[in-house]
Amino acid sequence: MKITLSWQGKAYTADLAQPHSLAIPLRGGQADPNCYHSPLATMTPIENGDFIGSIEAGAAVNHYLLSLSPHGNTTHTECYGHITAGGATIDQCLTRFWFVAQLLTVTPIDNGPDKVIEHNQLSEKLIEGIEALLVRTRPNTADKLSKNYSGTNPPYFTAAALQLLAERSIDHLVCDLPSVDKEVDGGKLAAHKAFWQTAGHLRQGATITELAYIDNQLADGLYLLNLQVPAIALDAAPSRPVVYALQDG
């Protein structure tokens, strides 16, 4: 099924039969990515007396208990409640789910012992008017699907880079990093704060998605993004960003 949409005064088409998921499947245990020394996700059959919720154990149905840390184990989408008091939750903040997005591939650059994504790496390539930005970092290898990032000081965004997104009214950022900020920064969270504008006019509907995986087969350019997030009343929830290539209509 193909749809036609109008954006920036121009017609585009998207084939809804050709989705590309950017989510890392949650499998449990060492098979998942790990950040911030989080406990491993687990999937275990529920037990109640003689009942064990596994067909392999003789039950009529599978009935499992899932334990996970959205920030630490899988692709997740977070709202400003991640860094503010007051109990803001992702199910309250994300009320639209379709966006015109740009995929941009960047190579983090050296900044002392760190690798960062800077303002000018984004500003020179951003397409005017996009609602969401998808950032794929190089090198982009399949080990991102199960990498243990804990204690490794992964690449991150500078505050100026995410200030730029706020100034351009780009409300949704999807990236393949474990965090937009430095792993250990003393609680500064400068990039998060710049994106949500916590010191100014708070961008309550804006979201950050981390730990995505953007396959190399997807070319940089325009996409239609469907940001799928379950109705979980936390600052963040596991998510499934799905994109569809946009073609000139």
Image (tube, rainbow, N blue to C red):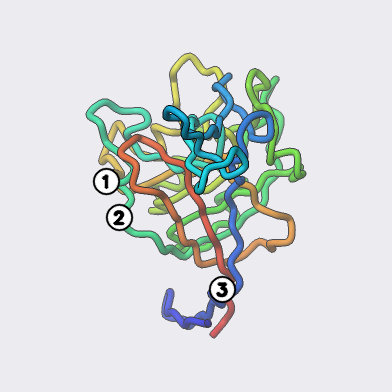
Q: Do the residues labelled 1 and 2 touch (CB within 8 Å)?
A: yes
Q: State the SS at label 3.
A: strand
Q: Are marks 3 and 2 in contact (CB under 8 Å)?
A: no
Residue displayed at 54% across by 29% down: 72
Coordinates of residue 135 in the picture (x, y in percent): 59, 49
Amino acid type of the residue that numbered disc 2 sits on in the rendered structure: Thr
Amino acid type of the residue that numbered disc 3 sits on in the rendered structure: Leu
Q: Do the residues labelled 3 and 1 touch (CB within 8 Å)?
A: no
Give the alpha-carbon distance from disc 1 to disc 2, as whole Å. Answer: 7 Å
Pointer 1 residue: 92
Residue displayed at 47% across by 83% down: 4
Coordinates of residue 152 in the picture (x, y in percent): 68, 21
Crowding near pointer 2: few (<14 within 10 Å), some, many (20+)?
Answer: few
Q: State the SS at label 1.
A: helix
Q: Which of marks 3 and 2 is nearer the N terminus?
A: 2
Pointer 3 residue: 246
Crowding near pointer 1: few (<14 within 10 Å), some, many (20+)?
Answer: some
Rendered view: 59 above or below 45: below
Q: Which of 120 and 51 is in front in this view?
A: 51
Residue displayed at 28% across by 44% down: 204
Coordinates of residue 112 in the picture (x, y in percent): 69, 21
Amino acid type of the residue that numbered disc 1 sits on in the rendered structure: Gln
Pointer 2 residue: 95
As drawn, which residue projects farthest toward the top? 186
Rendered view: 115 above or below 241: above
> Could you say which quadrant of the image residue 28 lies in?
top right
Residue 150, label in figure = none
Residue displayed at 51% across by 34% down: 52
Give the alpha-carbon distance from disc 3 to disc 2, as whole Å. Answer: 23 Å
